[in-house]
Image (tube, rainbow, N blue to C red):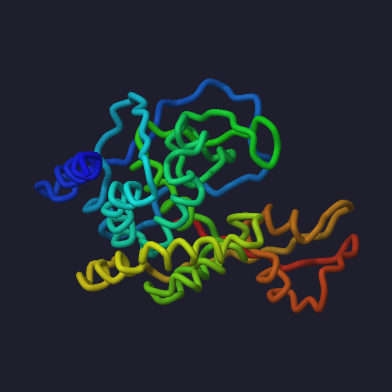
Amino acid sequence: MIKRIAVTTILGMFLFSCGVKKRTTYAKKPKQRTTVATNKSQSHTSSGTKDEGEYALPEDTGKFKRFSVNSVEEYIDTFADIAMFEMQAYGIPASITLAQGILESGAGRGELSSKTNNHFGIKCHTDWGGDYDFHDDDAKGECFRKYNHPMYSFRDHSIFLTSRARYAFLFNLDHDDYKGWAYGLRKAGYATDRKYPQKLLALIDRYQLDEYDKKVLGTGKIVKKEPKEYDYKIHVVQKGDTLYSISKRYFVSIPELMKLNKMPNSNLAIGQKLTVKSEKIK
């Protein structure tokens, strides 16, 4: 409870101040890293939320704060307010944010979250200019984003989902459709675990995390997002291309790619022309 009060106090001081808009600042610039993800991402920017300043985080102090909790219940008690703030600002159900945080971070007790405050398993990618650390995941010594406080991880999670085209369809769901979000995240490739949706839903059901969605919806403060616009281009299939590699390159899900090109199966031929799309950067 003490941690929850501390976090809530920090947020309250800035979220409800005299309208001063704060700029979100991440950890210090890293030295040149030797291992980065091979996929080129869109620039890591704000989602364009109109009232983002109202939910801006306090300036980063530049000092790493080791942060841990002792139970799932304490994790929820500590971070529920942050998850609800993020839902108001970005439209991601608080229940989903909390369930992902619990699952990905081991309720704040996992090795990655303990040494990086990274509660969502977000890797560096080529657009990441903040601090980082290495951790064994799908491969040995992968590069993961590092934050000075977990609240910056929660904000980066929101920006990550809103700035990539492959997650765009999720924001067309009703704000309380956490089941659609759970299955949609797996479909879009957030996790490779086939049971990922079921694990999220089990956490939401067990700890009644959807109650936090209801609290936010009851306030009527969710910011409405403007419809996303896309650029369409043609990709000519080269030797070695797969639907998976193409989907990762253009940040579009495999089912969406197949639907866009009316493909009956996943077979590709060298020289085949595929229509791909990417979100316009405004």
Which is nearer the eye, 50 or 167?
167
Q: How many marks?
A: 0
Query: Residue 179: x and y, percent?
Result: 48, 72
Which is nearer the eye, 267 or 214?
214
Residue furthest to the top: 31
Residue furthest to the left: 18
Task: Check the picture and name the quadrant holding the N terminus.
Answer: top left
Query: Residue 109: x and y, percent?
Result: 45, 38
Res. 21 visible in picture: no
Residue 87 located left or right of residue 129: left
Query: Residue 169: x and y, percent?
Result: 52, 70
Which is nearer the eye, 221 or 75?
75
Q: Is residue 204 above or below residue 136?
A: below
What residue appears at the point 44 percent right and 57 percent down from the top-left corner?
A: 99
Task: Check the picture and name the quadrant holding the C terminus.
Answer: bottom left
Query: Residue 219: x and y, percent?
Result: 20, 70
Residue 97 located left or right of residue 1: right
Res. 232 visible in picture: yes
What residue appears at the point 75 percent right and 79 percent down from the top-left corner?
A: 262
Residue 245 located left or right of residue 62: right
> In the rendered image, which quarter is residue 191 located in?
bottom right
What residue appears at the point 53 percent right and 56 percent down from the top-left corner?
A: 164
Q: Is residue 218 above or below residue 53?
A: below
What residue appears at the point 44 percent right and 50 percent down from the top-left corner?
A: 102
